[in-house]
Image: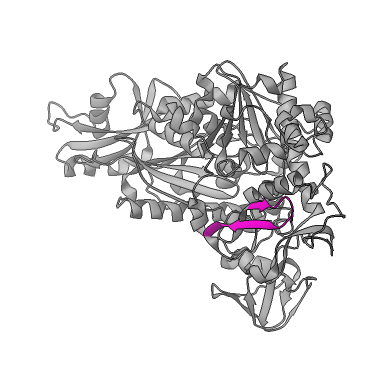
Amino acid sequence: MPKVTFLPSNKQIDFEDQENLLKAAMDAGVHINASCGGAGVCNKCRIFIEQGEVKGEELPDGGWKACNTVPVTDVVIRVPVESEMDRKALARPLASKAVSWIKIHGESLDLKTEPVVTKELIDLPEPSLHDNISDLGRIRREVGQSFHLDVDSQVLYRLPYALREGNWQVTASIMETARSDHKRLVRVQPGNETRANYAVCVDIGTTTVSAQLVDLRDQKVLYESSNYNPQVSFGEDVISRMEFSRKVDGLDILKDKIIECLNQLIEELVKGANASKQDISFISIAANTVMTHFLLGLETKFLRAQPYIPVANQFPPVRASEIGCDLPEHVRIFLAPCVASYVGGDIVAGVVGVGLNHHPELTLFIDIGTNGEIVLGNQDWMACAACSAGPAFEGGGIKFGMRATVGAVEVVHIHPVTFEPMALTIGGKKAKGICGSGIISLLAGLFMTGVLDRQGKFRRDLDTKRVRQGSEGWEYVVVEKEATSIGQDIVFTEADVENLIRAKGAMFAGYLTLLESVGMAIEDLERVILAGNFGSYLDLDQAIIIGLLPDIPRDRFFFAGNSSLTGARAAAISWPKFQEMKHVSQMMTHFDLSDNPRFMDHYVSCLFLPHTDLSLFPTVKEALKA
C-alpha cells in the first residue's frame, strides 16, 4: 500500500486502492482546489510530484490532475500555493466606500434580553415527612406557576444529586418551546451557576463559517472566529457538493467535515474568551438550505432536481451531541428556518438581522454568491428568489480565479492610455490568482478603458502586449509570471469574461423579474442592502459599471456585512426574534426563476456590458461618452 506525503503540510496517508490523489488529500485533510468536486472538468486540482511514480493525467501548463492521478509507488506531492487557504484573509478590512447599514440603523442590535435558554436560581425547601413530594415535583412547584414545565429525561439522572449537593439551592436551565404555555427543563446544576450563560452563534456559508460566543446576560460578543468551510475540497458550490453527497459515504463525509469545523471554532471561542463549554446553553445557526441539510445529514437528492424539494424548511431543536458536536448533553442547536431549496435560513436571518421587516421603504436585499439570493419588499410583503449566478464571483469557472485569501489580487486599475494594470493583492504578497472583488474591478477597468467591448470581446487593435492570443483564445495579462508566486502569467480570458457576464446577468435579471412581478421598476427602489462577506468588499461604481447592481443614487446603497450572523445572534439573545424569523420565512413569496420566461428574456438582455438597454444605466452611459 503506497504512502502519500503532502507538502508543505507534511501530512502522510496510506493510499487506498481505487482512490485518486484528490480523494487521498481529502482523507488527509489537505485542501486542493477542485471547484468541480472531482468531476475532472475544472483543471484546478493541480499537484506536483516531487518523488515517486504516478499514473494519470498531466496538465498542459505543468503538474498533474489530482482527480485523475494515482500513485504507483510511495510518492511525495507538493500542493501549489494557489490551493493554500490563509485564514488571515477573513479578517481583512472592508471596502472603504462601504456605508454600514448595521452601524446606521442596527435595530436588531438593540434587543431586550430574552434568550432561548435562561438560567434561574432556585432555593427549594428541604423535604420532610410533611413535604415529601418528588424532587421533580419540588422543582415544578417553584418554577412552573405560569406555564407547563416539560422535562428532558436525562435531567432526571442528575437531579437528586444536584439538589443535595447544592443544599437545595440549584440553577435550572429552562428552554423556550414552540408553545408559549410550555417550557422545558434541560439542566439542573447544584448551587448558583447563573454567573455564566453563553450562546454560540454561527453562520455556515458555502465558502466560510463564522462563529461568535455571546454572553446572554449583557449581549456582549466575548470572542469570534472564522474559517473556510472545509467542504470546499469537495466542490466550490452547493451543486458540486450535492453531486458528491450521492457517492458512497459522501453525505457522511460532508456532515463530518462541517461538524469538525464547528468543533474547532467552538474550541477557539471558549479558549479565546477564557470560558468553559459547560457554560454554553445552546447554539443558534443560520445556514442556507443545502448547508443545513449537510449539517443534519439529510438527503439532498430531491433538493437537487426539479421540483427542488427539501426535506424540511423548519427544523426542531437538535441535541448538539447527537450530530457529533463536542458539547454537553443539554446543548441544543436552533436552526433558522428556510424558505425554499435555494433561499435558506441565512437569508431569513439576514432579513431579520437588518430589520427589513420593520421598515416601509421598498428594499432590495442582495446576497451575492453562488446562488445569488435576493429579497424584495418591506414590512408588509416580501418576494424572494435565487438567481443561480454560479461560482464566478468566488473565483469558480475563472482560469486564475480563487477565493479571497492571501496573495489573491483584490483590486486592479487599468491605465487608460497604456492599458497597463496596477494590481493589489490581499496581504501584499506575490499574486497567485484573482478573487471576486479583483475580478469585478478588472472587468470594470477593462471595459471603461476600451480594452473590452460591450459584448465582452477584447479589442485586437490596441497598442499593448497585454492583450494577446493565448492557448485558450484571447486574453489579458494581469500579472506577469516573474511577479507571481505560481511561476506563470496570471491572465484574464474571454471565456472568463463570458462566465462573469452570465453571472452578473443572472443577478440583474433576477432583480428585474421580481420587480416586474409586483408591478414595479428599478427607479422605485428606495434602498439596496448588500449582505454577505463578498458584498462588503464590492466597489459600488465598479459593480454598477459591469451591470451587477442597479444604477440608482449611491446613497441608497448600504452594506450589511455578515447579516446572517447578525440575525443568528439576534435570535440567540431574543426568543421573540427567533419567532420573528419563522414569521418572515412564511411571509416571503418564493419565485422560481428556473422556468420563468420573463427571467430568461431579461437574462438574454443582460448578456452585455452593462446591458443591452443603456438607459437602465444612465451614469455608465454618460461615462462612456466622456
**Observer-nearest residue: 419 or 180?**
419
Magenta region includes residue 384: no
Foreground pick, 40 / 432: 432
**Residue 409 shows in the view:** yes
- Residue placed at 47% from the left, 43% from the top? 202
In this image, 606 relative to 47: left or right? Answer: right
Q: Residue at x 34, y 53 (%)?
A: 272
Q: Quadrant of residue 107?
A: top left
Residue 415 on the magenta segment: yes
Q: Is residue 249 visible?
A: no
Q: Residue 487 falls in which quadrant of the image?
A: bottom right
Of residues 548 and 257, the one drawn nearer to the viewer in this rendering: 548
Where residue 89 sits in the image (x, y, percent)? Answer: 52, 55
Q: Which residues are magenta?
A: 412-427
Residue 62 drawn at (x, y percent): 75, 74
Displayed quadrant of residue 584: top right
Q: Is residue 552 left or right of residue 109?
A: right
The percent coordinates of residue 157 (x first, y second) are 31, 43
Count of numbered marks:
0
- Front position in the image: 355 or 282: 355
User: How is the protein colored in the picture?
Assistant: one colour
Query: x, y (%) of residue 133?
Result: 21, 29
Q: Quadrant of the N terminus?
A: bottom right
Q: Residue at x 25, y 30 (%)?
A: 139
Left or right of 429, for residue 520: right
Relative to 614, 426 lies left or right = left
Screen quadrant of the C terminus: top right
